[in-house]
Every structure is written in structure tokens, then in C-alpha cells.
Amino acid sequence: LAIREKVLGEDHIDTATSYNNIGLLMKGMGELDDALVLYKKCLAIEEKVLGEDHITTATSYNNVGSLMARMGKLDDALVLFKKCLAIQEKVLGEDIL
């Protein structure tokens, strides 16, 4: 991660992937607050670089939503799950889902 931040920059999509991957590990270790920070960093980069309607960004909405649900923040999770679904419907089509 430190190399990607230094070489590629903090707003590079590959750096976002590292934030996501470390967040996934933190989630697995039960360090949910730390995981949330990393997932949100990833999401912010994807929104900026790829746009809010990109399918990869939708996956991050889902990831943050899943973590929020696990943390008991169900209303917040639902908002993110709905954003994810809306993007998937727009990009993939409702018939695919």
C-alpha cells in the first residue's frame, strides 16, 4: 500500500484496490471500524476516478453496505444496497439481474 500511495498516488484506482483488500482483511479480523475507514477510502477514490455509476463503484457500495449491516447500521446499509442495485440495473439491465 505504501508503495502504491507513493508511486501511483492516493487517488489511483490501484491504490483504491489496496484499501479495499486491506479493509476486507480487517473485516475478517473483526476490526470493523478500521475496515470501514478503508472501504470508504476505496469508495471515495472510485467515485472520483470511475464515477458514481460505474459497476466497480457499485461493488464498493455493496461492500460498505455489507459492513454497515454487520455493524448493525441497517438503515445506512439499505441506502448503499439500493445504490448498488440501481447502478447494476442501469449498467447490466434489469433482465440480467
Image (cartoon, grey):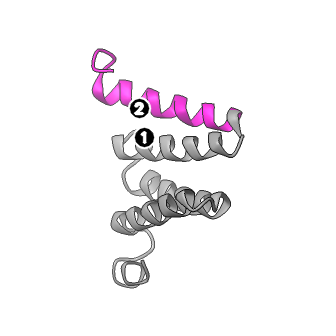
Magenta stretch: residue 12 in it? no
Mark positioned earlier in the residue sequence (1 or 2): 1
| Residue drawn at point x = 55 percent, y = 63 percent | 26
Dot 1 surroundings within 10 Å: few (below 14), some, or many (20 or more)? many
Report which quarter residue 92 is drawn in.
top left
Dot 2 surroundings within 10 Å: few (below 14), some, or many (20 or more)? many
Q: Picture coordinates of residue 30 (x, y %)?
A: 62, 59
Which of the two residues, 29 or 94, is positioned nearer the viewer here?
29
Q: In the displayed structure, would residue 64 be above or below residue 83?
A: below
Please count the marks in the image: 2
Magenta stretch: residue 86 in it? yes
Which of the two residues, 56 or 50, is positioned nearer the viewer here?
56
Secondary structure at badge 1 equals: helix
The amino acid type of the residue labelled 2 equals: Ile
Question: Along the horizontal axis of the image, is 78 left or right of 1?
Answer: right
Q: Main secondary structure of the magenta part?
A: helix
- Distance (Cα) linking label 1 and label 2: 6 Å
Looking at the rendered image, the quarter that the C terminus falls into is top left
Q: Residue furthest top?
A: 95
Q: Which residue is mark 1?
A: 58
Q: Which residue is mark 2?
A: 87
Question: Along the horizontal axis of the image, is 81 left or right of 78?
Answer: left
Question: Along the horizontal axis of the image, is 92 left or right of 43?
Answer: left
Question: Along the horizontal axis of the image, is 74 left or right of 91?
Answer: right
The amino acid type of the residue labelled 1 equals: Ala
| Residue drawn at point x = 45 percent, y = 43 percent | 52
> Which segment did they paint magenta?
75-97
Looking at the rendered image, the quarter that the N terminus falls into is bottom left
Q: In the displayed structure, would residue 77 be above or below residue 16?
A: above
| Residue drawn at point x = 45 percent, y = 28 percent | 85
Q: Picture coordinates of residue 95 (x, y %)?
A: 29, 14
